[in-house]
Image (cartoon, rainbow, N blue to C red):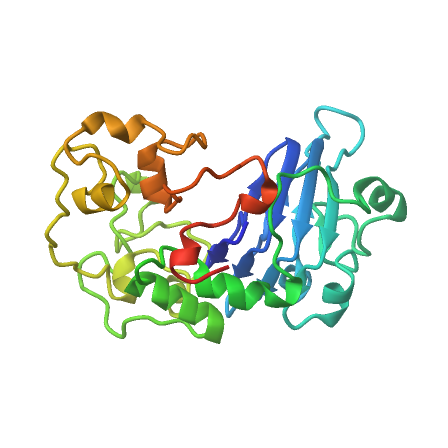
Amino acid sequence: MRNLWADNTGRNPSIGWGGVFNFVNNIVYNWVHRTADGGEFSTMSNFINNYYKPGPLTPKGAISYRIVKSESRSNKLFPWAQYGRIYAEGNIVEGNEAVTKDNWNGGIQIADKDLPNGIPADVKALMRSNEPFAMPHMTIIPKDQTFDKVLENVGATIPSRDIVDQRIVEEVRTGQAYYVKKLPKKNPYGDFWGLADKSKAEDGSFKYRRLDKESYKLGIITDICQVGGFPKYKKVKPYVDTDGDGMPDEWEIANGLNPNDPSDANKDCTGDGYTNIEKYINGISTKEKVDWTDMKNNHDTLAEKGKLL
């Protein structure tokens, strides 16, 4: 929920073989061959209000508007195919009005190369659910707001978004990949430590890699050096925590706790079920007891202190 899946060739994501799978308010960008896949047998999947944006490495054709490719893998277990069931609603595929209007009009696909005309009607009738499967309570962002809301808030944004996340978010927003013009001479395609010699090319890279070596210019990298490396952060003075309980003295004093009592980290000052250190980590109120069984109270408490979703 509310994740950004950017610059992955496939498995955006890969679904297991059973149970309920929820994929809600996500952005998927610049995939190569697979968005979501798997989800066979007794899997029940909810795909709701996600945003799919093909990137420079996303092929034309069916892959470019693929929401999920359901698999059966049952040819050795059963004499028939057994795909999972899917509820798909409100998913936007940028550049494809037909699939955006009706997600089952090509967006839901199956892994069977012998079906050039799409999913047979009898198979689709078994796969398609017209109602969402049971899922945990969550506030679902309207489909036309998913892209902007998720990009604005995704990642570690409090107190500020770091330069790595800034680069990725900007790439998704513009569709343009950033990369360095001149790679380092040593391991320009990554340090493939532990890779068997028979699988190494002359330059030390993976010999059987499917993508071109210059895929980093189109968003998919093999080493962080191709996009300038990680930022170097300065050391900062740690906060004062006299009793070593994980909560700063300043916060404890402001919230009526004892900065000299390490045991109060595991106590619950309001009786709402969350320990004091959990209240500190998640920005939960220490002044009043909150009924967390009331779904209206379950929201992103940290986002309220930064950018509100």
Q: Residue at x 70, y 26 (%)?
A: 76
For the residue pair 282 and 43, the one nearer the viewer reads as 282
**Front-most of residues 203 and 304:** 304
Q: Quadrant of residue 272?
A: top left
Q: Is residue 218 visible?
A: no
Left or right: 295 as drawn, with respect to 122? left
Q: Position of residue 89 (x, y in %)?
A: 73, 55
Q: In the visual, does 56 lie left or right of 267?
A: right
Q: Nearer the viewer, residue 277 or 168?
A: 277
Query: Where on the picture, by quarter, is residue 305?
Result: bottom left
For the point 35% across and 49% down, the residue is: 206
Please tell me whether residue 5 is drawn above or below residue 262 in the rendered image: below
Left or right of residue 111: residue 283: left
Horizontal and vertical percent position of residue 283 = 37, 47
On the image, the x and y values in percent for residue 16 come to 60, 34
Horizontally, is 285 left or right of 193 in the view? right
